Image (cartoon, rainbow, N blue to C red):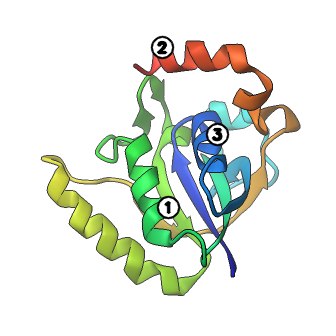
């Protein structure tokens, strides 16, 4: 059964690349989620006046990969205790978030995050919200690290 969930984990390039490699993930797409403007551009989102988070649509086959496994993988890629920041990226567009469209996912997400809190001294500040809107990012952002393999080395060094 195909399902969708949206993850905001800082820069969407790394989040998209990571999830696209997981068995059971059928499709990923970089975009802008839960903001207050329609069809924002990357430049508008970077000015932090749109309210959007850089996010990734993850479409997956729930008979192959579970929401719990996706959450486990997501938490490997973020610091859920930092607000509006991931690694060297600062701003509201870099907040961490889990945006759902299926209400039946909510108890699973909340239970997972509650258990995960035991791993951190500081509170988890990752948003858990229904998806209000999602606008695909410009084409050059899609599969960016796959199209620009040299950036991956720089990207990895910057976040090491």
Q: Helix or strand or loop: what does disc 3 sit on?
A: helix
First in sequence: mark 3 vs mark 2: 3
Q: Within 10 Å of the Cα at label 3, are there few (<14), some (14-19), or many (20+) other Cα atoms?
A: many
Instruction: Estimate the spatial distance between the alpha carbons at disc 3 and disc 2, rounded to whole Å.
Output: 16 Å
The residue at which mark 3 appears reads as 17
Q: In front here: 9 or 45?
A: 9
The residue at which mark 1 appears reads as 70
Viewport quadrant of the C terminus: top left
Residue 79 x, y percent position in the rendering? 34, 41
First in sequence: mark 1 vs mark 2: 1
Q: Indicate whether 60 appears above or below 152.
A: below
Residue at horizontal 51%, vertical 72%? 66
Q: From where the camera sits, is residue 52 visible? A: no
Viewport quadrant of the N terminus: bottom right
Q: Within 10 Å of the Cα at label 1, are there few (<14), some (14-19), or many (20+) other Cα atoms?
A: some
Q: Quadrant of residue 7?
A: bottom right
Residue 116 x, y percent position in the rendering? 25, 60
For this orientation, the residue located farthest to the right is: 139
Instruction: Estimate the spatial distance between the alpha carbons at disc 3 and disc 1, rounded to whole Å.
Output: 14 Å
Q: Which disc is residue 157 wearing?
A: 2
Q: Helix or strand or loop: what does disc 2 sit on?
A: helix
Q: From where the camera sits, is residue 12 visible? A: yes
Q: Indicate whether 4 appears above or below 32.
A: below
**Total numbered badges shown on the rendered structure:** 3
Residue at horizontal 30%, vertical 75%? 111
């Amino acid at each position: 059964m195909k399902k969708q969930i949206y993850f905001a984990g800082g820069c969407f390039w790394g989040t998209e690349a990571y999830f696209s490699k997981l068995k059971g993930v059928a499709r990923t797409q970089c975009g802008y989620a839960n903001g207050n403007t329609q069809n924002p551009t990357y430049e508008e989102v970077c000015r932090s006046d749109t309210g959007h988070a850089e996010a990734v649509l993850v479409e997956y086959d729930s008979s192959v990969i579970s929401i719990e496994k996706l959450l486990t993988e997501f938490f490997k890629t973020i610091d859920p205790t930092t607000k509006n920041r991931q690694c060297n990226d600062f701003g509201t567009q870099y907040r961490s978030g889990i945006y759902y469209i299926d209400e039946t996912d909510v108890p699973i997400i909340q239970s997972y995050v509650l258990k995960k809190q035991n791993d951190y001294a500081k509170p988890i500040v990752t948003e858990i919200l229904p998806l209000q809107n999602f606008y695909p990012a410009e084409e050059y952002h899609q599969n960016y690290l796959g199209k620009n393999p040299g950036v991956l080395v720089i990207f990895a060094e910057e976040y090491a």
